[in-house]
Image (cartoon, helix red, strand yellow):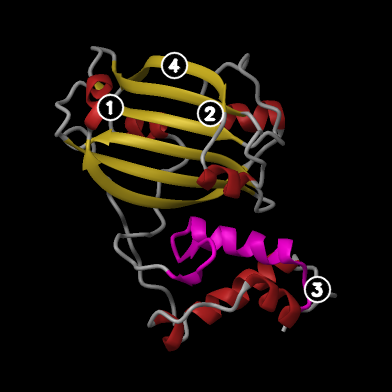
Amino acid sequence: MIDHKSKLPLHVQVEEHLRKLIGQEKYKNGVFLPKEVELANRLGVSRNTIRQATNKLENEGLISRKKGVGTKVADQKGLMTGLDHWYSFTKEMQDKGIRVTNLQLKVEWVTVNETIRNFFHCGSDKKILKLSKLKGEASGEPIVYFESYFHPRIGVSEKEEFDRPLYAMLEEKFGVVVHRSYENISARAAGALGRKLKVEAGFPILIRERFVYDVGDRPVEYNLGYYRSDRFIYSIDIQKGKG
């Protein structure tokens, strides 16, 4: 049940309800989840509240939606876990004794795909600020190519000092404190990015998709990282929980 008198936001309560729902055996076996309007009526909340919760679960890769068909528990094909050191790539490299620099930097206003629109809850005609960074060693050897998209609520413009550590700049200038991220990791051939990363088109690269939230659980940044597999290893430290 949803507690309308609780200080916990309705969409967070709905999200927790859905997490329990998708954990049920029948939904794990492919049964479609109740439709959006049915959930809204059952829980006594608006369809926008339902959509906010399902968008988050979809961003985490827990559910998949197909227009006109329905919503199902997603096939878990890859690894999803909390990763340390997501806060600053530059600082992480410094801790390893590697000095990295911006080899290329570009800022532009762009239209975005459905994934980013859903995460930011914005319309298809809304222009979003995109920051592209190619990072590597001072010798010019690239390690990773980043693409960052910022929620328009924050007010980031193309005139910012993007040579600075990103999250430090967001906190000091805009008062935005990033708190957590969800990450999806996959791999593919470099393709057209091979020229930028100085590898062959068929060379394997690691792709890290990141959804960043502030302390109020509001979306801040959508980030894609394309890593050269011969220059970077994603290390994951998993600890068994208590209980």
Tag 2 secondary structure: helix
Residue matched to label 1: 193
Residue shown at 73%/79% (left/top)? 43
Q: Locate the N terminus and report the quarter of the image it occupies.
A: bottom right
The answer to whether residue 2 of the structure is visible from this angle is no
Tag 3 secondary structure: loop
Question: In terms of depth relative to the viewer, which is nearer, 66 or 236?
Answer: 66
Residue shown at 62%/77% (left/top)? 17
Mark 1 / mark 2, whichever is N-terminal: 2
In the image, residue 242 sits, relative to residue 58, either above or below, namely below
How far is mark 1 from mark 2, CA to CA?
23 Å
Residue matched to label 2: 166
How far is mark 2 from mark 4, CA to CA?
13 Å
CB within 8 Å, label 1 to label 3: no
Is residue 71 magenta-colored?
Answer: yes
How far is mark 4 from mark 1, CA to CA?
15 Å
Mark 2 / mark 4, whichever is N-terminal: 4
Mark 4 / mark 1, whichever is N-terminal: 4
Residue type, label 4:
Leu
How far is mark 3 from mark 4, CA to CA?
45 Å
Residue type, label 2:
Leu
Other residues around mark 2 within 10 Å, as few (<14) / some (14–19) / many (≥20): some
Mark 1 / mark 3, whichever is N-terminal: 3
